[in-house]
Image (tube, rainbow, N blue to C red):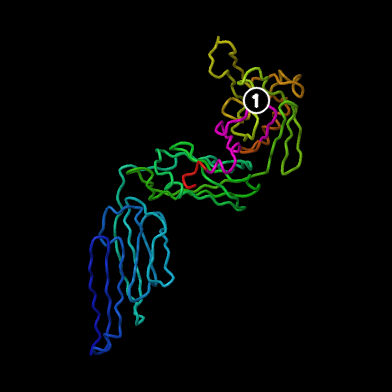
Amino acid sequence: MRGRLWLIVAGGAGAVTVFVAGCSGGVGALRSAEAATVTITPANGSGKVRPDAPIEVKVADGTLEEVTVTGGDVRIDGTLSEDRTSWKSARPLVPGTSYTVTVRARNGDGKSTASTSTFTTLKPARTFGIADVTPNVKGEKVGVGMPIIVRFNRPVSDKAAVERALEVKAEKPVEGAWRWIDSTQVIYRPKEFWEPYQKVYFTARLAGVQAAKGVWGTEDSSYTMQIGAKQITTGNINKHHATVYRDGKKLRTMPFSAGNGTTREYTTTSGIHLLMEKGNPVKMTAPGRKKGDPGWYEQMVNYAIRISNSGEYFHSAPWSVGAQGRANVSHGCINLSPEDARWYYGIHQRGDVVKLTGTSRKLEWNNGWGFWQLSFEEWKKGSALH
């Protein structure tokens, strides 16, 4: 008897099923050729599919040989079960995208068959993404204390879903965690300082992630952070000297004059600071005061490096050279000689560590980049996943 092949397509909401059977002889041959049944979800022709709904492929009376997903700019991989009877996509889909799933299965007689499902994901009314990442300057080398600061362009209400899509990998791995500052900003910090001289890779797989009701991510993005030398500055404010180390070796000791301590405002903070941005020159003004108010001042300073958001800098102060190394006379900044300030400015890396001691005013963890003021256990409490 001539062999036959029947192809019967049956579909319902959410699935397409393909039955394949073959024969080469009489009734006995038909019985020995088990049918292979392939089910693909979402079904062929489906529209407005949720991006966070997985693609699932199942086969009965056979095994899956190959599953491919085409469509969009983001690669969709998946996981095949050990017995090769099921496959599931490993990440969300891109909103507003047409996908085609192509499956090749093999039945009990070793005969192969192909089946497909083409569907479209929903087009979101609103989208969200990354507005800014710090650091993100091409070619920049940063210090071992540098955090990864991510700011989104819309408020995030499902912080756990977004955080699960964020991945940090270092060439020299160390444990780390994210902490949410508010609904638009999340910051990553390792448990210990980064090892120097390595690259850290940050990937945000936000395509298909729902950040808030009706708000979906539409693209992935990736960034590379280059860790430079391990530069750490230590100083006792009451002893008026700071020592700079690079990779454990002393580079220089700098006499300084810190805050005069007459008020809390004029007291330099103790704690673990990070070097932030720098400028030459920078205008210094009395915070919260206007010209004519008691305590008002305005002055341009050279070689200024910020260490907090409460107005603390290392900077050149030629007018107080006589006090440097002997007394604290500033409004809270660390005053250096022009020579030392110029040198320190030149070796500056954002994220370099500054450890200051000697005053009762402690740096707040959210004052500038004071994130190392928190223990790692405290830091992790700000994660949506801990």
**Quarter of the image where one finds residue 131:** top left
The three-letter amino acid code for the residue at tag 1 is: Thr
- Looking at the image, residue 24 sits to the left or right of residue 300; the answer is left
Disc 1, SS = loop
- Which residue shows up at 73% across the image and 27% down it? 339
338 vs 215: above or below: above
26 vs 364: above or below: below
Horizontal and vertical percent position of residue 82: 44, 70
Q: Which residue is mark 1?
A: 268
**Quarter of the image where one finds residue 299:** top right
**Quarter of the image where one finds residue 75:** bottom left
Q: Quick check: is 126 in the magenta stretch?
A: no
- Which residue shows up at 64% across the image and 33% down it? 271
Q: Quadrant of the N terminus?
A: bottom left
- Looking at the image, residue 270 sits to the left or right of residue 128; the answer is right
Q: Quick check: is 374 in the magenta stretch?
A: yes
Horizontal and vertical percent position of residue 351: 61, 38
View extreme (top): residue: 292
Q: Of 314 and 367, which appears nearest the observer?
A: 367
Horizontal and vertical percent position of residue 42: 30, 60
Q: Residues within 10 Å of mark 1 (few under 14, many from 20)?
A: many
Horizontal and vertical percent position of residue 159: 43, 44
313 vs 4: above or below: above
Q: How many marks overall?
A: 1
Residues rendered magenta in the picture? 354-380
